[in-house]
Amino acid sequence: MTFPTVVLAEYDRRWPDLFEAEKERILDAIGPRVLAIEHVGSTSVPGMPSKPVIDVMVGTRDVATTADACTAPLQDIGYECVPLPAIMDRRFFRRGAWLLEYTYHLHMVELGGETWHRYTLFRDVLRAYPDVARSYQELKQQLAAEHRFDRAAYTAAKNWFVEGVIARAENEFKS
C-alpha cells in the first residue's frame, strides 16, 4: 500500500461540524451495532494543524463480528475496508481519496479497550494542555517537512512523542 504525501492544513473550524455530520451518516448506516463514536486525531484538537482527514473512532463490543456485519452498510455510504493485517484490535475503513481534503478514516475498535483508551487519552491531553499541543504541533510541522513524500515515515517518527504523552498521562492519573 502506498501512502500519499504529507501536507498539513491549518486548523479548520468546520472540522467538528464535519465530524458531527459524518457521525450521523454512520449511525444511520450501522447505529444498532455502535456503542459510541468519538472524533479523534489532530482534527479533533482545536487549533491543531492536521492532514485534512477526519478520524472517526467507532466503539463496539466485538470488533471482528461488528466489522463483518458493518462492511456492506458502510460501503453503501462510501466507505472502503482497508486491510491492515498488523493491526488486530481494530478494523480500518476510509471514505474519500487519499490525496483529497475531507477524507474520513473510520477506526472500529472495542469500546473501552486499549486502542479506545489510548486514542481518547492522547486527544484529551492535547485538548487540555496547550503546551503539549504546541509541542506536538511543532513536531508535526518539522516531520511533515522532513517526510513530505513518506506518510508512513512521518507517522512512525511521531510515535515517540505520542507514547511519551500517553505514558505520562497514565502515570499522573494513577496517583
Image (cartoon, rainbow, N blue to C red):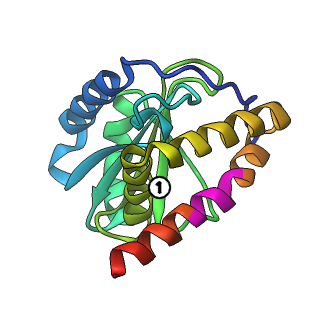
Q: Quadrant of residue 25?
A: top left
Query: Is residue 168 visible in the rendered structure shown here?
Result: yes
Q: Is residue 163 magenta?
A: yes
Tell me where residue 116 appears, x and y as whole percent: 37, 61
Q: Main secondary structure of the magenta part?
A: helix
Q: Is residue 58 above or below residue 79?
A: below
Going 31% across and 38% down the picture, which residue do you hit?
73
Tell me the element at label 1: strand
Dot 1 crowding, Cα within 10 Å, few <14, some 14–19, many 20+: many
* Residue found farthest to the left: 32
Tell me where residue 121 appears, x and y as whole percent: 39, 59
Query: Is residue 34 visible in the rendered structure shown here?
Result: no
Q: How many marks?
A: 1
Tell me where residue 31 appears, x and y as whole percent: 18, 44
Going 36% across and 70% down the picture, which residue do you hit?
113
* Residue found farthest to the bottom: 175
Q: Could you tell me the amino acid type at mark 1?
A: Arg
Front one among 134 and 10: 134
Report the residue marked by disc 1: 91
The quarter in which the N terminus is drawn is top right
Front one among 105 and 162: 162
The quarter in which the C terminus is drawn is bottom left
Q: Is residue 130 above or below residue 157?
A: above
Q: Is residue 85 magenta?
A: no
Q: Quadrant of residue 161?
A: bottom right
Going 30% across and 46% down the picture, which residue do you hit?
38
Front one among 70 and 139: 139
Going 37% across and 55% down the picture, which residue do you hit?
120
Which span of residues is magenta-colored? Answer: 158-164
Tell me where residue 47 appears, x and y as whole percent: 45, 28
